[in-house]
């Protein structure tokens, strides 16, 4: 009888621990791109980011996708960065936001949602940025 209770307790505990994780809420770059496309937003080519795509920014994540926004001109668009922890995500959002505060030339739009940080070229009009933000927040 004690073994049955112990087994039940272990199984219950494992179930509770797995339910506490947020992996079911974690988003992938592909899901974000699909949300943008489903919303009818301007999305061109996408590519996995390399270390060169991060520029001078710290590499706090190993998973990133670059996407082009054709209406902004050649080689302009945004980045989708996937984070394992919120502390790194918040740090990088602050990094990109502060760069824009220090120099208008470095301004970019940022959107934080769940485990994702989206950074978009600051030349995108604010009303269009809000459309990308709304599409992401639907996920």
Image (cartoon, grey):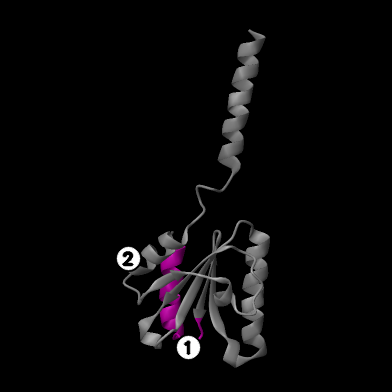
Disc 1 target residue: 123
* In the foreground, 95 or 68: 68
Tag shown at residue 38: 2
Residue at the spot x=64%, y=76% of the render?
A: 57
Residue at the spot x=56%, y=39% of the render?
A: 19
Vertical arrangement, residue 7 with respect to residue 62, above or below: above
Q: Alpha-carbon neighbours of circle 1 within 10 Å: few (<14), some, or many (≥20)?
A: some
Tag shown at residue 11: none
Most extreme residue toward the top is 1
In the rendered image, residue 12, in percent from the top left (x then y), is placed at: 59, 27
Judge from the rendering whether residue 47 lies leftward or rightward of residue 44; answer left or right.
right
Q: Is residue 24 magenta?
A: no
Would residue 23 be seen by someone viewing this image from the given angle? yes
Q: Secondary structure at mark 2?
A: helix
Q: Is residue 123 magenta?
A: yes
Residue at the spot x=61%, y=56% of the render?
A: 84
Magenta span of residues: 121-137
The image quadrant that residue 69 belongs to is bottom left
Gap in angstroms between the C-alphas marked 1 and 2 = 23 Å
Judge from the rendering whether residue 123 lies leftward or rightward of residue 103; answer left or right.
left
* In the foreground, 39 or 56: 56
Residue at the spot x=58%, y=25% of the render?
A: 11
In the rendered image, residue 125, in percent from the top left (x then y), is placed at: 44, 86
Judge from the rendering whether residue 5 lies leftward or rightward of residue 111; answer left or right.
right
Q: Alpha-carbon neighbours of circle 2 within 10 Å: few (<14), some, or many (≥20)?
A: few
* In the foreground, 138 or 82: 82
Tell me the quadrant of the picture where the C terminus can be found.
bottom left
In the rendered image, residue 1, in percent from the top left (x then y), is placed at: 63, 7
Of the two numbered discs 1 and 2 on the same chain, state the one appearing first in sequence. Answer: 2
């Amino acid at each position: 009888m004690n073994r049955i209770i112990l087994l039940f307790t272990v199984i219950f505990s494992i179930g509770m621990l797995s339910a506490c994780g947020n992996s079911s809420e974690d988003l992938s770059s592909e899901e974000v791109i699909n949300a943008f496309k489903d919303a009818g937003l301007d999305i061109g080519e996408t590519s996995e980011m390399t270390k060169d795509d991060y520029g001078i920014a710290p590499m706090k994540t190993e998973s990133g996708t670059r996407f082009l926004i054709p209406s902004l001109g050649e080689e302009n668009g945004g980045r989708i960065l996937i984070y394992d922890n919120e502390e790194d995500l918040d740090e990088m959002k602050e990094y990109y936001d502060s760069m824009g505060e220090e120099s208008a030339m470095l301004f970019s739009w940022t959107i934080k949602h769940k485990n994702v940080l989206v950074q978009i070229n600051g030349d995108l009009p604010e009303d269009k940025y809000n459309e990308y933000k709304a599409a992401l927040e639907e996920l």
